[in-house]
Image: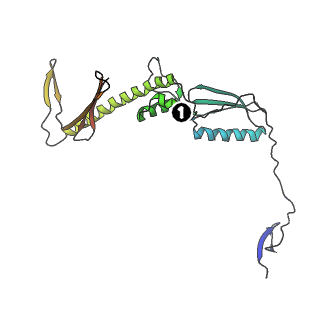
Amino acid sequence: MFILHERLVNNTHSFVRKDAPVVVTEMSTQTEPEVIWHGTDIPDYDGNLLMSFLRLENFIRLATAHSSKCGKQLVLTSRQLNFGAKVQHFWKCPCCSAELCLVNCNMIRSSEVADGAMYSRSQPDFNLRIVKGTQLTGINTTKLMEFMQGEMGIKIASDNNLRRQITKVRKSIASTYEGRKTENRKEHVSAVRAADKYTGDIEWIKNGERRSTCAGNICIDGAGCTRVYNNRHRGRQSAAVANSCVTKKPLALVVSQVS
């Protein structure tokens, strides 16, 4: 007994055996463009870099589409490595002379100005993100350079450039702290004055001007320590924080360090 299968042949239905040989009569093939390799004089760079996935994938799509249209492979013409963590590769089509550029990151301009600079300049976003991460995680630039460049071989900004960028991050942290502290205090005062059992502000006079202070519940705590280096060398550190008992948010933070 034969197992019959239905197959479409020349727009007609026919039944064939399952083990019957397949006969190919005519077949259309697509002619692939001949890709010619053109060498480049740009020396190889044996190193690693930080790369944005989106930028890499977009460049691959653009480069492959252009090569399929012209039928020739792109040629690397130059490479720029003098922008910190930013790396640029310039490619040229030998057929139509079109130029394509691969950039590994975006360029940004910070609102803060680095120490010693007149204005904020455009810079690779990796440069600023690296120093931001070091400040938030407590890693100094020496350890960063030893790990990123020494161990991993990843191209980043120089040590002097990183230290200048750190001043931007510290200014941004300070301005953010002042703004958040003001918001927390305003929220605390509004919540205390809106309470039903609030007895009123404390009135006082300074330089002939009458002022008032909100009397709300707060909690203050702190800690301090002394480190002895030698018989006559000591380092002292202390910190104190004031939190609102109403909004549960910090109202003040004081840190002191004496070396």
Give the residue displayed 82% in from the left and 48% down from the top.
31
Relative side of 161 to 32, left or right = left
Measuring from the top left, give residue 255's x and y in whole percent: 29, 28
Residue 40: name its quadrant.
Answer: top right
Which residue occupies 30% across, 34% down? 183
Q: Residue at x 28, y 23 (%)?
A: 231
Position of residue 81 measured from the top left corner of the image (x, y, whole percent): 61, 27
Give the residue drawn at x 60%, y 38%.
55
Which residue has dot 1 on it?
Answer: 148
Direction right: furthest residue:
25
Residue 150: image quadrant is top right
**Secondary element type, mark 1:** helix
> Of residues 10 and 222, which is closer to you in this image?
222
Whole-percent x and y of residue 59?
Answer: 65, 38
Q: Kindly tell me whether residue 79 is visible in this rendering.
A: yes
Q: Quadrant of the C terminus?
A: top left
Residue 143, percent from left and from top: 48, 31
Q: Identify the colour scheme used.
A: rainbow
Q: Which residue is outermost to the bottom?
A: 1
Q: How many marks?
A: 1
- Rate crowding at label 1 as few (under 14), some (14 to 19) or many (20 or more) other CA atoms within 10 Å: some
* Quarter of the image where the N terminus is located: bottom right
Position of 161 with respect to 186 (left or right) is right
Instruction: Answer whether residue 189 is visible to the viewer in this image.
Output: no
Examine the rendered structure and indicate whether residue 130 appears above or below residue 65: above
Compared with 152, 11 (above or below) is below
Type of amino acid under label 1: Met
For this orientation, the residue located farthest to the front is 231
Q: Quadrant of residue 102?
A: top right
